[in-house]
Amino acid sequence: MVTRKKSGLGTKFQPRQPIPVEERLRRLFTSLCAQVDGGHFTSAVKTCHKILRLDPTDEDALQTKLFLLLQTEQYEAALSLIGDDTSDHRAFEKAYALYRFHKEEEASNILQRLKQTQRDQRGVLHLDAQLNYRLGSYQTSLELYNELLETADPQSEEYSDVLTNLTASQKHLDFMNMGFLHALDGLPTSVVSAIETLPPPTSHPTQVLLESHSAQNKQSEEEPPVTRTKKVRMKRVPKGVIPGITPPPDPERWLKKSERSNYNQGKKRKGVGGGATQGVVADNVHPPPSAGRTGGTSKGKKKKS
């Protein structure tokens, strides 16, 4: 009789050797480059996390992660990644995150320091122009945009963006200088006189918007919620039942009849009524016949002798 030897018997199991850290980092950086080039920023952030778990001090992974956080508008995470770093190494990224957080004063302080060392960097000029535009310094923003427009490629996307921002700055500046006078000329005389007699506003426009927004939120919280009627699915309606017309079923139909609230309602009790009321003495009431009554025949059982 021939017996077949099972394959694998007698061979010792050998565990797979772990991949070296250098090889794992090389593979992760290859995936990271492909994800960034393809625009898959969310996946690229996760790859940066894997790289930093293997090497927390990798400068390229930290810089790439900071770039990705700013691209995906995760400004709070970007600021926490920068931390308390006061050097100029990531000062521009910190100023941009603060600008997007509407912390203009802190962003302006960092930009003033950067303009002394990185004045020719286009990113610093762009951010400085945007910050001045938001703060209402339209003349300064106009000058910065003119400087950027002169050195930009006319065929690039940057050129069209700078031209759009320059036009907006010019319009605001024209309105602040002379445009408001033409706007006032077009208003009725009563409105112009009322505007001239009113005191100047004391609140910042942003503060007024925040107060009105909070008031609207408070009013919406005080209003009772609107209940929406749920649409009836006709597939679940029994045959012969019309929603809204057919009366609903009795909610006590699962109880015993004796336990229902309408038990014995509308029914007459047996033996009640039809006779004399309580306390009435009836006349002509004949006593029952007694056993000693004479004059009649009585039938009884015959005694046995």
Image: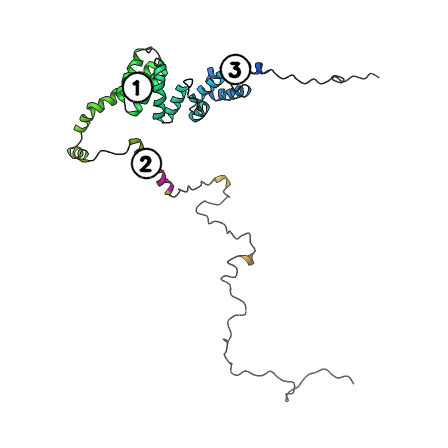
Q: Which residues are magenta?
A: 217-221
Q: Which mark is residue 165?
A: 1
**Judging from the image, what secondary structure is the residue with disc 2 in?**
helix
Q: Which mark is residue 233?
A: none
Q: Tag 2 or tag 3, which sits nearer the N-term?
A: 3
Q: Tag 1 or tag 3, which sits nearer the N-term?
A: 3
Give the amino acid type for the residue marked by disc 1 in the picture. Asn
Indicate the quadrant containing the C terminus: top left, top right, bottom left or bottom right: bottom right
Horizontal relation, residue 171 to residue 113: left or right: left
Residue at the right extreme, as displayed: 1
Residue 96 to residue 226: above or below: above
- Provide the residue designation for mark 2: 211
Residue 203 image point, x, y percent: 28, 34
- Provide the residue designation for mark 3: 29
Measured Cα–Cα span from mark 1 to mark 2? 29 Å
**Judging from the image, what secondary structure is the residue with disc 1 in?**
helix
Q: Residues within 10 Å of mark 3 (few under 14, many from 20)?
A: some
Quadrant in which residue 109 is drawn:
top left
Residue 287 to residue 162: above or below: below
Quadrant in which residue 196 is drawn:
top left
Horizontal relation, residue 48 to residue 218: left or right: right
